[in-house]
Amino acid sequence: MFGSLKLGKLFGIDLFVHGTFWLLPLYVFLNNLSGGVAAAGLDVAVIFAVFACVALHEVGHAVAARGYGIPTRDITLTPLGGIARLERMPEKPLQEIVVALAGPLVNVAIALSITAVMPAATVGRIAEAAANGGYFTVLDPASEFVFRVWGANVFLVLFNLLPAFPMDGGRVLRALLGTMTNRVQATRIAVGVSGVLAVLFFLVGFEQSSLTLMLIAPFIFMLGRAELAAVRAQAARREWRRAATEFAQTLFGPPPADRFSGWRWDADRRVWSEWVNGVLVREVRDV
Ligand SMILES: [Zn+2]
C-alpha cells in the first residue's frame, strides 16, 4: 500500500512519490474542510506546489553532484520532505559545500522569480503582513496561493541552512570545519552543534506548546548520531584497508601495480591514463 509511485524523470533522474506522501494532502484537506471546500482545496494546491519546489531543491543537489561526477540514484518525496539518493557524498570540503548549497539556492531562485512576477498589490500586502508580525487581511485566492508558495520557499531556505544534520546547513558546517581538521573530527563537532540545536528546538517547542518543534528535536539528534557513525565506520574501513595493504607489502614486497600496464580511470579529474610497466605514457581527458 505504501510503495513508491514513479512520477517521471527530472533532469534524467527518476522521481518517486512515497506512498505515505498522499496522507499529507488528504490530512490537510480533511482537517481544513471546516473553512469550506474552496479553502481546503487551496491548502492542498499549496501543498502540491511546495512539494514541486522541494523536488526541484533535490534536483539542485543532484545536478551539483553530477558536476563532480557523482550520479544520483533517484529522488523520493515523502511527507517530511525530499530525499536525493546520491551514490556518495563528496568529501572534499568545497565540493560538499557546493552540493549542499545547490538545494537551498534553487528555492532562493524560485522565491526571487515569484517576487518578480508578483502583482504590486500582493507585494503591498506582504509588506503590511511583515509590519503586523505576519498577519494580514485575506487576499484573493490566486494571490494567497502565490504568497504562500513564496513564503514556503523562504522557509525552505532558512530551515535548510540551520547548521544541524540532516539539514544542508549541517553539511556546510561540517565541510567548513573539514578545512581545518579531519572529516571524523569535523563531523563530531558539527553533530555536537546539531545536538545543541535539537535541545533548543525541544525547549522552544515546549515553551510554545508546539508538538512539531518538539518532534523535530529527536529527529535531528538521531540523524546527527547516524551521520557520525557512518563517517566513523568509513574512516575505520579505510584505516583497515591501509593497514592490510601495508602488512601485505611487508610480507610480499611492493604490489605488482608498480609495474602496471594498461589504462586507469581518475574519476576526480575525469582523465584516462595509459601506463606501461609502471610508467605514465599519456593521459586522455574524458569528453
Ligand atoms: Zn537540501
Image (tube, rainbow, N blue to C red):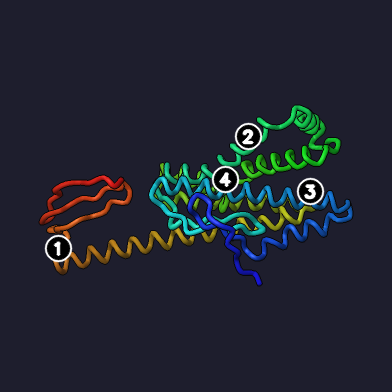
Quadrant location of the N terminus in the rendered image: bottom right
Query: Would residue 231 be visible to someone looking at this image?
Result: yes
The amino acid type found where label 4 is placed reads Pro
Q: Which residue is mark 4?
A: 163
Q: CA distance from mark 2 to mark 4?
A: 26 Å
The amino acid type found where label 2 is placed reads Ser
Q: Are marks 2 and 4 in contact (CB under 8 Å)?
A: no
The amino acid type found where label 1 is placed reads Pro
Q: Between label 2 and label 4, give the one nearer the viewer.
A: 2
Q: CA distance from mark 1 to mark 3?
A: 67 Å
Q: Which residue is mark 3?
A: 42
Disc 2 or 3, which lies upstream in sequence?
3
Q: Which residue is mark 1?
A: 256
Q: Which residue is mark 2?
A: 113
Quadrant location of the C terminus in the rendered image: top left
- Disc 3 packing (10 Å; few <14; some 14–19; many ≥20): some
Q: CA distance from mark 1 to mark 2?
A: 58 Å
The amino acid type found where label 3 is placed reads Leu
Disc 2 or 4, which lies upstream in sequence?
2
Q: Between label 4 and label 1, give the one nearer the viewer.
A: 1
Give the camera-side residue of 105 and 35: 35
SS category of the residue bearing label 2: helix
Q: Quadrant of residue 115?
A: top right
Give the camera-side residue of 175 and 54: 54
Q: CA distance from mark 4 to mark 1?
A: 46 Å
Question: Is 117 located above or below residue 233 in the figure?
Answer: above
Q: Are marks 1 and 2 in contact (CB under 8 Å)?
A: no
